[in-house]
Amino acid sequence: MRGGLTKTLAVLSAAGLLAVSACGNSDNNSSSGGSSSGTKDVTVFTWWADGGEKAGLDGLVSVFGQDCKDYKFVNSAVAGGAGSNAKQVLANDLQAGKPPSTFQAHAGAELKDYINAGQVDDVSGLYKDFGLDKAFPQNLLDNLTVDGKIYSIPANIHRANMVWVNPAVLKKANIDASKAPANVDAWIADLNKLKAAGVKAPLAISKGFAQEMLVEAVLLGELGPDKFKGLWDGKTDWSGADVTSALNKYKTLLGFTNADREAIDWPDALGYVNKGQAGYTLMGDWVAAQQLADKVPDSAYTYWPAPGTGDSFQFLADSFTLPTNGVDPDGAKCWLKVVGSAEGQKAFNTKKGSIPARSDANPADYPKYQQSAMADWKKDTIVPSCAHGAACTLGQNNDILSAMSQFSGSQDVAKLQQQLGQAMKTS
Ligand code: GAL
């Protein structure tokens, strides 16, 4: 773990990413999990409203119930993958001066939005109070530090570049599900075989961020990790012929997807795979948590890194903040203590599909998927996710999402290429 984090941190640092956090507050409060029975409310804003995501949150809540008895957990989750609805609600609440006690945000460029807007407090003192300066690798700490301060506490590390596969579907076209196609072209060849075998939409996909993740995976597979990183830190030219070629392959992939892609969220796309209507979906490893929550047996699915990206671990990290002028910051600090603790990270990550940010976890405590992710984290090249805030600000992401949704209809590669480059230049 320590070596992997070190690498990540180096990447974060190089990309100028590093900070963590987010925010939010809504009124659909409902208690969830745990036994929080205190009298003072701690409103926790996330987008983990259902399934495996809520199971992870419930893990944190149960530890909070034991360790923060003066406080009562109040669930301010707003449903919608990747915060597609939550982020706007949060922005409105912060703007209105009504922050939650704490909110979820991604480590990296996304956190900077909140820091620059003066919406989150420095929590570096808590790292000392909670012993996090010893629990997280020094390199992580160095890289979380912005102008001598740290603004959030990471709960986990997720992997974005994963494909989830139904072997029974692949069998219809005699495709070996146990290993990834060597590259995007080989994947396209398999998708053609599946179509010929009668699978109408072999690659399941959903709206918005899922399409952004697929285009990122194709760019990573086609350009390789160094040039891919350069797309986000300005060192790779978005107008290059290699980007055009990758975007054309993305267009081809989109031709194998479900027609209702603009109307569904990621759990629905995963459902198409589980029901045998599709062979694959590309999605982050919160899928492992969803499969666990839905009791899908290990034998019913498999997974591998997106074709051509096998040596890269495209990471993102969820973290929690201390909003400026929040009500009862002591309650929020108790939540943050749980988030950073060994017990909290274990309760959360064993259910969430992610691996802990702390360096003292025991892989044997984790399900099969996370054990493999922990091993990969140590040996792979670490690259950041744009869709999940490690490499891109909220503004950049919004512009990219808008370009992806236009492309879903227009299929205009030249326009998409121009808009993606523009998003990274201006927002
Ligand atoms: C990401 C978040 C993950 C997971 C995912 C899907 O942005 O970091 O923890 O919740 O969205 O909703």
Image (cartoon, helix red, strand yellow):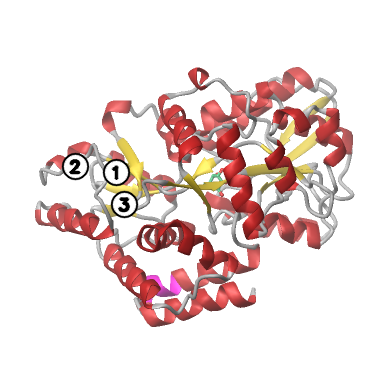
Residue under the point 15% across and 52% down: 194
SS state under label 1: helix
Give the quadrant of residue 301.
Answer: top left
- Which segment is the magenta one? 405-409
Q: Is residue 264 above or below residue 138?
A: below
SS state under label 2: helix
* Left or right: 169 in relation to 264: left
Q: Say whether mark 2 is within 8 Å of ligand 1.
A: no
**Which is more toward the observer, 329 or 252?**
252
* Left or right: 402 in relation to 254: right
Chain-order first, disc 3 or disc 2 = 2
Q: Which residue is mark 2?
A: 169
Distance from the alpha carbon under mark 3 to that under mark 2: 18 Å
Q: Which residue is mark 1?
A: 273
Kindly tell me whether residue 76 is visible in this rendering. Answer: no
Q: Which residue is mark 3?
A: 307
Closer to the observer: label 3 or label 2?
A: 3
Residue under the point 60% across and 44% down: 317
Chain-order first, disc 1 or disc 2 = 2
Callout 1: 10 Å neighbours few (<14), some, many (20+)?
A: many
- Residue 145: x %, y % from top left: 77, 48
- Residue 226: x %, y % from top left: 48, 59
Q: Is residue 197 above or below residue 288?
A: below
* Left or right: 133 in relation to 288: right
Distance from the alpha carbon under mark 1 to that under mark 3: 18 Å
Callout 3: 10 Å neighbours few (<14), some, many (20+)?
A: many
